[in-house]
Amino acid sequence: MAAPPQMTCVRCPGDLRVEVGSAAVDEPGPGEMRVRTMMSAICGSDLHHYRTPAATRDANGFSQWALGHENTGIVDAVGPGVGYPAVGDRVVVYGIVGCGHCVHCRRGEDVFCADAEHFSRHRHGTNIAYLLAPARNALPLPDDFDWEIGALLSCNVGTAYGALRKTKASGDRPLAVFGLGPVGLACVMLGRARGATVIGVDPVAERRALALECGAQVALDSSDHDLIGRIVEAAGGEGVAASIDTSGHPAARAAAVDALRIQGTYVEVGVGHDPTIAPSQQIIFGEVTLRGSWLYKRHEWEGLLDFVRRRRIPIKSLITHRFRPEDAVEAFELADGATAGKILFDWS
């Protein structure tokens, strides 16, 4: 029997290294689809893999898989029993693979599935020419959204949308966004689309400049000795009604809570090494609400599409760099420097 054809993929050994290699192009099994990748992207969580020691990644078996979880493309084959999608459909591949039958999966909340698998940890990730995934992970990409928009929606903008819904950001609810990487910039852009005054906070000047381009009224240096006072002033003197932290940094988390007005809402998006938030007088006496937000839910997809379409949100302006897959080493070095916006890989 002839060996299966090979395709390009981007793997991550760890220790600040990625490698462009090859993998077999497999046929989809029952309930599966195969998607020809048109666009993929680098996410902040991919950088966690990139920065992890190689010995740790090898011990967990992660380095064998292609990296990534942001993907959009064309279905080029389906396995037995698949009614949707069909060959030729344009899709975004949802980034968490749930079991498909537990109560959370039935609700379209695969992120809470106890048996969930993650692309690039349990199976090939999305920085690969042809991706195998369960057909139920196909999210339809309408014709009026191009491949770059599909890649942005697949995680980056979708994650921001899920977090923004929890803040109830609006014209009378000013919002502070801590961490102005791609997800933070998307939060800025979507928060403005909801009519909120948006205050961006980041230590990197380049990213503060990007936040102003994305619609932030104010962009503050997180090292400012009077950061909270400046946020309160920018929010009208009472503090912000809501804050989002996308950095996962303990100092940012503390500031995001301290910047809130009475009964404000803090939403944590960033995954950090220190998961704790110390109880403070602001939490207790200010009766603030603390919420987590992970990715977005499959049942939010249509609402996300409708929101971006109706508000005509120019989410492609989040993209600052585009690379071919064979230039992944350079792309990850740039992403690791924390000065760029969204970085995409063009597989088309």
Image (cartoon, rainbow, N blue to C red):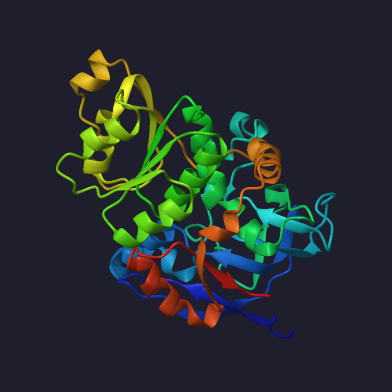
Task: Compare residues 30 and 310 and report the one nearer the observer.
Answer: 310
**Is residue 268 placed above or below 261 in the rendered structure?**
below
Q: How many numbered callouts?
A: 0
Residue lying farthest to the bottom in this orientation: 2
Question: Residue lying farthest left?
Answer: 225
Q: Which residue does the image show at 27% across and 48% down from the upper left?
A: 273
Q: Quadrant of residue 35?
A: bottom right
Q: Which residue occupies 59% across, 48% down?
A: 97
Q: Residue at x 83, y 63 (%)?
A: 88
Q: Quadrant of residue 341?
A: bottom left
Q: In the rendered image, which quarter contains the C terminus?
A: bottom right
Seen from the viewer's position, the closer of residues 234 and 243 is 234
Residue drawn at 54 percent across, 31 percent down:
165
Q: Is residue 179 left or right of residue 130?
A: left
Q: Is residue 149 visible?
A: yes
Pick whichever, 152 or 26, lies toward us.
152
The N terminus - image quarter? bottom right
Q: Position of residue 5 (x, y in %)?
A: 69, 82
Residue 299 placement (x, y as % from top left): 66, 35
Q: Is residue 187 left or right of residue 33?
A: left
Q: Where residue 343 sits in the image (x, y, percent)?
A: 49, 66
Residue 125 appears at what percent x and percent y? 55, 63
Task: Please say whether residue 111 is visible from this viewpoint.
Answer: no
Quadrant of residue 244 in the image? top left
